[in-house]
Image (cartoon, rainbow, N blue to C red):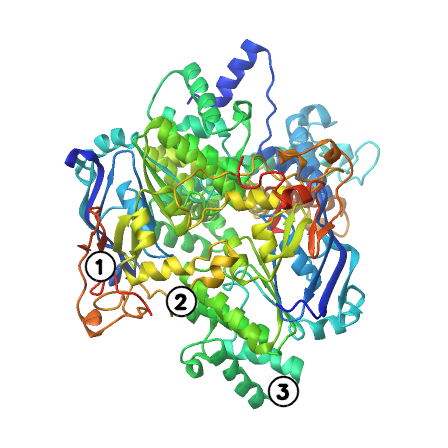
Amino acid sequence: MTETENNKILEVKNLSTYFYTDDGVVKAVDDVSFDLKKGETLGIVGETGCGKSVTALSILRLIPQPLGRIVAGEIIFEGRDLLKLGQKDLQNLRGNKISMIFQDPMTSLNPVYTVGNQVMESLIVHRKLKKDEARREGLKLLEMVGIPEFKRRFNNYPHEFSGGMRQRVMIAMAIANSPSILIADEPTTALDVTVQAQILELMDELKYKTNSSIIIITHDLGVVAKYANRVMVMYAGKPVEFSSVDNIFYKPAHPYTIGLMKSVTRLDEEKRGKLKPIEGLPPSLIDLPKFCIFRARCKYACDECKGEYPPLKEIEKDHFVSCYRGKEFMEGIIERFDN
Amino acid sequence: MENNKLLEVKNLKKYFNLRSGFLFQKFTGSVKAVDDISFFIKRGETFGLVGETGCGKTTVAKVILRLVPQTSGEATYNGVNLFKLNSKEMFKIRREIQVIFQDPYASLSPRMTVGDIINEPFEIHKIGDKRKRIKKVKELLRVVGLNPEHIHRYPHEFSGGQRQRVGVARALALTPKLLLCDEPVSALDVSVQAQILNLLTDLQKEFNLTYLFIAHDLSVVKHVSDRIGVMYLGKMVEVAKSEDLYKTPLHPYTMGLLSAIPIPDPELERKRKRIVLEGDVPSPINPPSGCSFHTRCPNAQDICSMEEPELRDYSKNGNEHLAACFFAGKPIV
Amino acid sequence: MATIKELEALEEIETGKKYSRTSLYKDAWKRLRKNKLAMLGLLIVILLILIAIFASLISPYNPIERIKEDSSLGPSIKHFFGTDLLGRDIFSRVIYGSRVSIEVGVIAVGISVVIGLFFGALSGYFGGLSDAVIMRVADIFFAFPYILGAIAIMTILGPGIVNIFIAIGILGWASIARIFRSSILTIKNKEYIEAARAMGASNNRIIMKHIFPNSFAPIIVYATMNVGTAIIVEAALSFLGIGVQPPTPAWGKMLADSMSYIDVAPWMMFFPGLAILITVLGFVLLGDGLRDAFDPKLK
């Protein structure tokens, strides 16, 4: 983590993505801003429906049409606003400079083509390689992601691969054009624990090899602790806290972040104490309150919290939080880990 | 001592036969989903069963409940072998053994109200009259932390965590003694997961329940269990007290499993050395010879592929600590 | 079976408070109401049923009464749809003809649903040999053209409306059985079925209380669509002269009788043909709408 150079590779400003459903407007992502630095791993954590996946999809403009729409914001990558790009430029970008790995390796490969074919395709499309060059490159990629007997496996179909192996193929495809940004949306949720470890280690290793940046979207705080440099915690479509991984884990300043930390079962816990879950449920994304979205579940809510939604504020260098009492939490004036 | 065991499973085997062809089917092999498993659960304790997809942990629960027939072995509940009971006797004993399922979306019938769902066990076992039943149903809703007013709502009107509470209420209706929890929290978000785990712990104290807790997440299992059994490819590879299993794992698979789970503590993770097990779990249709783990084991020697290690006691502190490995306790480098 | 609903009603009376209930059927109805074509279909079906019930009140003439001096008249104020060769009022005959169509639709499809559900349950829930045998028999029914099968059965049984019910009923079971079987197969392995079995529920109870309500939607959809088909088959059989016997007015028979005069008296054919078209359209639109309403993801 080199803090000296401030080279932002991606900057998301005030992104809002809404879904227009029969029941009303779902504000899946509402006014989200963050940046990604060169060579870092950014973790986006949160629970189901917090908007972390939609944020990722918005970057590549892969929001399901016609329900979803990016209604506001800018996504600056290499000096251009991705939201203003034409279809052609966008396609040139996807799978090339910015690529994505999805959660379910069972459905994200096309069952009627061989694995080799699918790896080659992106090389042919984006790098305009000839067929035999693409083949050579493709084999190299499969070797790189650790597929055993990759020469033989090249001509296999996806169904002949296990879940972990398919995810390796997905990674091979994603890094085929040495992207500057790799977005991984719950890349290991569908996999077994031991395979999960393999895939995460592989991604981390490749990040150093290809000098790319990673955005990893996950609900697993352990994964974030291990692999992320900076973390954005999302709740009900909004970022509630954004800082370095150490700040998030050791100096959390938002009651939701604190609640998450206390809810999780830890392998290393000394004795079987009671977990301290966050009471209640997240609000409906259709009619969000004007005041703090977490107030209803927050036991530290004060008079100020009845006012407007607290904006994301920098309470110390590179530590952003959207809570009126964030500083008190951070400095431990409000007892964090005890009730 | 003997009396202390509420459930004892001995040499349980469940093979699924694979057949092909129509009308005149041919036997083409078998999946050894559960292959010679033994364990016991003491009254009032929680026994955790962990393992990855396809290791047979769910099948164990289904066989105990007699939802699928066993191939061989026995399951002794309170002194009686469940597999020897006729259907009438089994029907009676079902009141005492209940189950909570993984998927709170699939485990509740979408066409029944929550009240009907919790009422069903009373109907099946013909307990109480209408008035008593409705009272009981409301009380159960209260016990699991739901609003009794919501008795007439349908499952789709609830969140995942609330549905799981309904599932718990249904399981509690017949005041069971043994509760089989099959991945009860793995479909839930972290904060909701904690709510359900707390609920299960509270209920255990309140109703003096015994749990068989099946899950793939070792950190969850460790949190709730007194003792843990680790399964790999239909076999039990290690059984120990929770703390012992975490502090001094003996089987290399357990070591790998423990190491694979990241701890939500960045400082600790930076220092922690990770053992990454190579490869995938082999197919249970054609399991490896000898020790079924030898294909992925960093410590494997020649003997491991030839002979099958027995589950033996390696206890040091008096607490039983079983492992099935020729080189049990040997650290992985 | 004492359901919570009964208990609820009891309590409502005792305490005077009301419970709000929403169900999947209510949700489906909400979606159906938004679907204009489906509502058109529903309107047609309801109108048709009303017409069939109140045929004697609506029709200006006795449908079998021959008015000699009015034979072969075109549409006019006196006879909206004109008259046929024998001087019968076509408007009245079309109205009465709806009775046959609706009867065939409801009763014949009812028979096929009952048979289909029985065999579907047998094959889906118990599987094994019974499944293999039933499904192969169903395949044979599928391989046989519907109309041909109906003609074959009618020639054996002889003409008449009851025999039409039987013929169409027998022919329609296979599709219902298949649908019920496949929905049982998907529902059978759901955890709530296992939960019920773990509680000690009997097979009967599981089928009636769990499987049936959960697979009802596709059966309603298919039955509705089958009504359309049944009406067409009945019309075809009557057209061929092996269906409803004269003088009972039936749309198919009216078509057959007027076929030779298509160039001189087209109205004789036009109105019963239109009636068949609108009726079948009504059921198909409704069925389509129901399918979308029950499972919006299917769209």
Extreme residue in the top direction: C14
* Disc 2 chain ID: B
Residue indicated by mark 1: B324
> Pointer 1 and pointer 3: residues touching (CB < 8 Å)?
no
Foreground of the two, A275 or A327: A327
Label 3: which secondary element: loop
Q: Which residue is mark 3?
A: A129
Subunit that carries the residue with mark 3: A
Task: Please state which amino acid type lies under the numbered disc 1.
Answer: Ala
User: Relative to B210, is B254 above or below?
Assistant: below
Can you see residue C153? no
> Image check: A113 left or right of B272?
right
Residue C199 versus residue B263 in the image, above or below: above
Residue position for label 2: B276
Other residues around mark 3 within 10 Å, as few (<14) / some (14–19) / many (≥20):
some
Do the residues bearing badges 1 and 2 touch, measured as CB atoms within 8 Å? no
Above or below, comparing residue A26 to residue B173 in the picture: below
Mark 1–mark 2 Cα distance, whole angstroms, equals 20 Å
Would you call the spot at circle 2 few (<14 residues within 10 Å), some (14-19), or many (20 or more)? Answer: some
| Depth check, front residue: B26 or A118 | A118
Depth check, mark 2 against mark 3: the one in front is 2
Q: Real-space Cα distance between discs 1 and 3?
A: 52 Å
Residue type at numbered disc 2: Val
